[in-house]
Image (tube, rainbow, N blue to C red):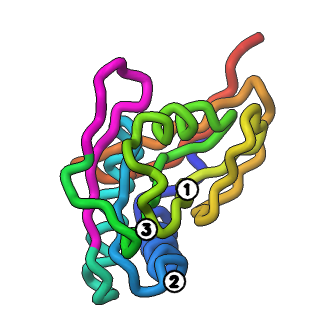
């Protein structure tokens, strides 16, 4: 079942970008997009932030479940706000794994999480500060964010047969 189309997602991401700028309080913004879909969302957020704000912003990709090490391409200091970006938050495991891979976390001014969809069911004590949509689901349901041309294009609810 399709829950959201490209137009609604774009409006939602634009609103999320404004919320991120407000949370950053004029500081430099470092967006870390997790995996493929989190990075696609981070790139779109980056574009909206650049259009609507003077806050310096940069985005990069982190593969949360890989064994590869991760190095930030931008210098980190007390004037930088880190935003961990993912498409969907469920148990919080992906966010936690991504956060564990980021070096020098203590040097950031602030760290928070931004997600397009929060579907509940947290296993780990991870909460998103900036949430595009709250879509409560059952455990046997799955939310999938479809991409088209590298941008979030649809949000689909799949029910698994059990």
How packed mark 3 is, by other alpha carbons closer than 10 Å (few <14, some 14-19, many 20 or more), is many
Picture residue at 37% right of the left edge, 36% below the top: 35
Residue at the image position 54 percent from the left and 54 percent from the top: 115
Circle 3 is placed at which residue position? 81
Q: Are marks 1 and 2 in contact (CB under 8 Å)?
A: no
Q: Which callout, 3 or 2, points at the residue further toward the start of the chain?
A: 2
Q: Using the image, tell me which numbered label, if any, was put on residue 22.
A: 2
Q: CA distance from mark 1 to mark 2?
A: 14 Å
Q: Which contiguous range is marked in magenta?
A: 57-71
Of label 1 and label 2, which has the lower sequence position? 2
Question: From the viewer's perspective, is residue 120 above or below residue 54?
Answer: above
- Label 1 environment density (alpha carbons within 10 Å; few <14, some 14–19, many ≥20): many
On whether residue 92 falls in the magenta region, the answer is no
Q: Is residue 67 magenta?
A: yes
Q: Pointer 2: residues within 10 angstroms few (<14), some, or many (20+)? A: few
Front residue of 124 and 147: 124
Visible residue check, residue 97: yes
Cα separation between marks 3 and 2: 11 Å
């Amino acid at each position: 079942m399709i829950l959201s189309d490209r137009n609604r997602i774009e409006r939602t991401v634009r609103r999320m970008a404004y919320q991120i700028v407000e949370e950053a309080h004029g500081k430099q913004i470092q967006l870390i997009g997790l995996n493929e879909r989190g990075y696609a969302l981070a790139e779109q957020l980056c574009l909206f932030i650049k259009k609507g704000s003077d806050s310096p912003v940069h985005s990069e990709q982190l593969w949360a479940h890989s064994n590869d090490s991760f190095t930030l391409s931008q210098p980190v200091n007390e004037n930088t706000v880190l935003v961990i970006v993912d498409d969907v938050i469920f148990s919080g495991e992906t966010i936690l794994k991504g956060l564990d891979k980021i070096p020098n976390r203590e040097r950031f001014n602030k760290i928070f999480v931004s997600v397009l969809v929060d579907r509940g069911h947290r296993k780990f004590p991870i909460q998103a500060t900036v949430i595009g949509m709250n879509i409560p689901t059952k455990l046997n349901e799955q939310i999938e964010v479809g991409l088209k041309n590298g941008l979030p294009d649809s949000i689909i609810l799949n029910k698994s047969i059990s």
